[in-house]
Amino acid sequence: MGGLEKKKYERGAATNYITRNRARKKLQLSLPDFRRLCILKGIYPHEPKHKKKVNKGSTAPRTFYLLKDIKFLLHEPIVSKFREYKVFVRKLRKAYGKSEWGTVERLKDNKPTYKLDHIVKERYPTFVDALRDLDDALSMCFLFSTFPRTGKCHVQTIQLCRRLAVEFQNYVIASRSLRKVFLSIKGIYYQAEVLGQTITWITPYAFAHDHPTDVDYRVMATFTEFYTTLLGFVNFRLYHSLNLLYPPKIDSQAADELKPAEGKEYAMDSESYLERLSALSASLARAVAPTHEDEVEVDEFPVEGETAELMDAKKKEQEALEKHKKLFEGLRFFLNREVPREPLAFVIRCFGGQVSWDKSLCIGATYDATDPSITHHIIDRPRLDKQVVGRYYLQPQWVFDSVNAKLCLPVADYFPGVLLPPHLSPFVTEKEGDYVPPEKLKLLALQRGENPEEESEEEEEEEEEEDDNDKEEEEEEDESEKEEEMKLQKMEEQKMEEQKTQSKVLPVKVTAGKVRLEDKQRLEQEQQSEEKRLAIMMMKKREKYLYKKIMFGKKRKIREANKLAEKRKAHDAALKEQKKKNKKARQA
Amino acid sequence: MEQPSPSGGSPELSDSEQSEESSVYSGLEDSGSDSECSGNGEEEEEEEEEEEEEAPGSPSGPQAQAPGKRKTLEDDSPLEGKQDLVVHDEYEEDSSDEEDIRNTVGNIPMEWYQDFPHVGYDLDGKKIYKPLRSKDELDLFLEKMENPEYWRTVQDGQTGAEVPLSEEQLELIRRLQRGNFGDVGFDPYEPAVDFFSHEVRIHPVTNRPADKRSFIPSLVEKEKVSKLVHAIKMGWIQPRKPKENVPTFYDLWAREDPNSVLGRHKMHVPAPKIPLPGHAESYNPPPEFLLSPEEQLAWEQQDPAERRPSFIPRKFRSLRAVPAYSRFIHERFERCLDLYLCPRQRRMRVNVDPEDLIPKLPRPRDLQPFPTTQALIYRGHSSLVRTLSVSPSGQWLVSGSDDGTVRFWEVSTARCLRSIPVGSVVRSVAWNPNPSICLVAVALDEQVLLVNPGLGDRLLVAATDQLLDSWEAPEEERIQPVRWIPAGPEERGKGIRLLVQHDKPVTQVTWHGKGDYWASVVRNPGGRQVLIHQSSRRWSQNPFRKSPGMIQCVRFHPLRPYFLVASQRSVRVYNLLRQELTRKLQSNCQWISSMAVHPGGDNVICGSYDSKLAWFDLDLSTRPYRLLRHHGRAVRAVAFHRRFPLFASGSDDGSVIVCHGMVYSDLLQNALLVPLKVLRGHAARLQLGVLDVAFHPQQPWLFSAGADGTLRLYA
């Protein structure tokens, strides 16, 4: 045996990974600084394939980073900024301690700052990459923009978040890229399609937050720091892609309209400006005046392998999308006081509708409640005393459901005070075998162009008739049962008589043998299932485990779907029963 | 005090007099001070009189004093108008440090005199007595009713006398109550006169010449400046950085460089997106997604991390009623934690059709014949049947049971032909495989019986007896590990021909294929456990010098002079001719229960108590070719068919599984194992199911002995 002795853990997987503590020591950073750096640079731990090998034989739970990642962090200029900041804080504390106010002032003037531009560029080398990762950034910015201006984090951060969120909303309005909205119990989900990327974000309902104590706001603030930078650059690029000015300017015409309404109420122009922007009611100024020639017919380039049908389907889809974008075009909405203004204004404007609200509610109202041209009045109270003829009074869910259904739904279900139909999630696409709620089926039929409403009404009527008939039928059934019993009795009597006659003839009792019908299909099935069982027995241990796991998942899915269906059935039955009872009570 | 009041009234009044008067109204000095100038002789006289009166301590003193006082106060009032005209000297009345001349106790708290009958001393050093409290409630009431001055009467703390307040005093009190200044003439809104103005005047305010220090440079400042200069030199103080005038946001991706997509980005594992919400999360979900009360209870009892879904679906009648979600910040925070703390790993999602995982095997139907249904049940034993054996002709069946009998059955009719009571638990029975000999070995307790059942051809029976009886004792007695005892007449009547007495309990007997030799396993850990006997010569020997662990089972090789011994975890193959170990098979099982050898001789199967069945291919490896886990519980018995490619295993779960085990003569092709049928019938009792299985020698039939006291035939 020649050569040097090979030492363990000096090659292979063990050298590719580094534990968190060792990484921290290598970077000479404190844990909070290391955390901040990891968040900003997007470095995350990796799960090694063979944990024990990487952990040098120990099975203690440790987090591992890729050594390459940590080496990459070594060159980061921000690390030195962290150190500078630490020194700055120390100096400042000392100056405060000695009451050297001049020094304090001087130090504060030279407060070290850092920029995250290069990190954004480094993490997202292309713009599409940045768009792909925008979900969390948006959710976080929308959350932070609702925080109170005191306490949890810097006011500047909150203001910046608010600004960026509003800018993004304005972009979505201008580009008409919103696709789906969902009112959940957690908040409102929005889904937009920006440059071919689906972006989903959630905003909380507009209430004061009950700030939890077990949440580390520093971590969230660090994330927000990065996200605001990212979102700022993304907004800039998005605005320029639409030839809009950035920072956004309200269209001069709209601005003029808005100006006289409020000049006095807002002392600070900058503040009122953001407020007006966040009202979402005005369109934005463009760098280049929009020309209608922009909308050129796109030439078709037939791709090989694509059949005409496929092309047609594509074209149809495109048309549907265009139609969806112009869903509320020409409609004028008015939001009542109790309705959440911002989400509704945002959604309505995204689909081309015009929207206004009471002047006292928020800045940016364009027309009054008495305007006769209003087509839809959104209201969220059981009834309204004074109703104006010529407009629909609707509950807010109508707007969201219509957007998700891609068509203006029939308004009858959404009148004030009416029990609303369920609000379904637009994000669920049911596959075969999944449970589909009946409302969804109805909606799908509506989208296909059928009109299930009439049918269902007819059905209901029929049902009612059936209900009426039921009793009769039951009675009939009873009668028929009685008849059958009678028949049977007769038969038996006949038999008895026959037997008696027979017994007189022959004392031996012979019962006729029954012909056992063999269900061939069933036999076949049984045999097949047995074969399968036997084959499963012969599976290898690993495959058997996998197979069982897959089958377990499948079975659970089926079970859950069945359970939901059963629950629905029971619920419907109970409802029907209730209806019947009510009817009876009314009749009596 | 030096200036006498210029009022025209009384310049002759002395200081002491003035002070005296003012101190009379010490409680209300300010108002009293207004009237001092009007003091006149009359008043003084009266006072003197009063003092004189008081001196003897008459109780009527204060009462008498009161009208006098009132008088003076009343006298004051007309003079008020005059006062305004008079330039008032503010120091005139400053008599707070003056002593009260009526009562000389000084400026002390009067409650010190609470417990004494007097309140102090007058100028002559006589006690001033407190006025007697002679009034009872009635008197007080009467006075309250009758005296119009009662409401303005107060008690003088100094003398204890009751004093009615004057009009001015009352007015003063009212003014103070209203929050006005006490002095009527005071104007709080006088125009302010600036002494110093911001305008530079030609005349300085002070005429003081400038200090010298204002002409010479300051040392302190020099020190400070030099400190700063030093700090700048050393780089401790940096000049203020000029503000960079760069826009915060610009087109970052103006020039998208394809080279900037590094290997890092390809290695990057993007965090999975948050799953999108389903119908259940809606504020107004369809009714079936709401949890019933039981489900909700179950949800609450679950660990928060395991809850599915992580929230309780709720229904609200309108959007207005939807509250804030209390865990919103939590969820965002958890997402943040996931993003920077959660280890990531690229994992290929297994996307296989489960049907593809099932191995493609030949259909059992094509592998017929094999036993498929239960055909017969042999009832008769009253306790569990431990063992069974089939005669080489396939006509008879022998079984041994815990009820202490050995029964012989006719296979085709399930009739019990003979029952031999042996008196103890039968551990093992084995029918001699030689068709020309009719002999059965029965193992019970410490002996093995060789039984001639007397079934079938009489010639054969007689020949067997003759064969056994033809033995002649050798001339020199050899030492044997066992004793061969010829049966007595009574036992002979039962069919027993020979008893082989061992020294320890025998657990298994097995015949060699030729039918002359047989082996027995003795439960004797550490000692000799395996014995090989020759029945024709009544000769036994111990083949092993050393015991290879606890031996479970032994078999003779069907073709070659090999002997297989199964210990707890391995099977050893010995060459009997060359007297050596040829092979040791590792079973990968915890505890082997039984073993069977393929009639071809190259394959062995072992059943184990950990519910496995190991198939060994002796040509292939010492490890099992296949480990079959078909049974749910311990495998008790395994058997090969002599003619068909079948093998069976019986287990404690009450089932017998028949498998197709085709062995090819081509050495390159491995054996084909296909499970064919799961045969059920035996009921489990005492956690025991099937205890023994055996195949019919010619037919594809299977016998099984169960713990429920029956034997069953599957055909």
Image (tube, grey):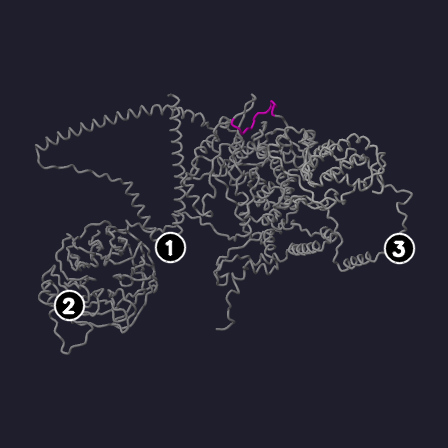
Residue B231 x, y percent position in the rendering: 76, 58
Q: Check disc 1 and give the amino acid type.
A: Lys
Which residue is rendered at x = 32% and y = 49% of the image? A533
Query: Is the same chain shared between marks 3 and 1?
Result: no
Cα separation, mark 3 vs mark 1, equals: 105 Å
Q: Check disc 2 and give the amino acid type.
A: Leu
Magenta residues, start to end: A369-382
For residue B212, the mark is 3
Mark 1: which secondary structure?
A: helix
Q: Which residue position is annotated with label 1?
A: A541
Where does the N terminus of chain B fall, quadrant-wise?
Answer: top right
Which chain is home to disc 2?
Answer: B
Establish if A50 lies above or below A260. below
Q: Check disc 3 and give the amino acid type.
A: Lys
Residue A425 x, y percent position in the rendering: 49, 37
From the viewer's perspective, is the residue at label 3 or at label 2 nearer?
3
Which residue is rendered at x = 50% and y = 66% of the image? A8
Q: Quadrant of residue B621?
A: bottom left
Report if residue A7 is visible in the image. Answer: yes
Q: Which residue position is annotated with label 2?
A: B499
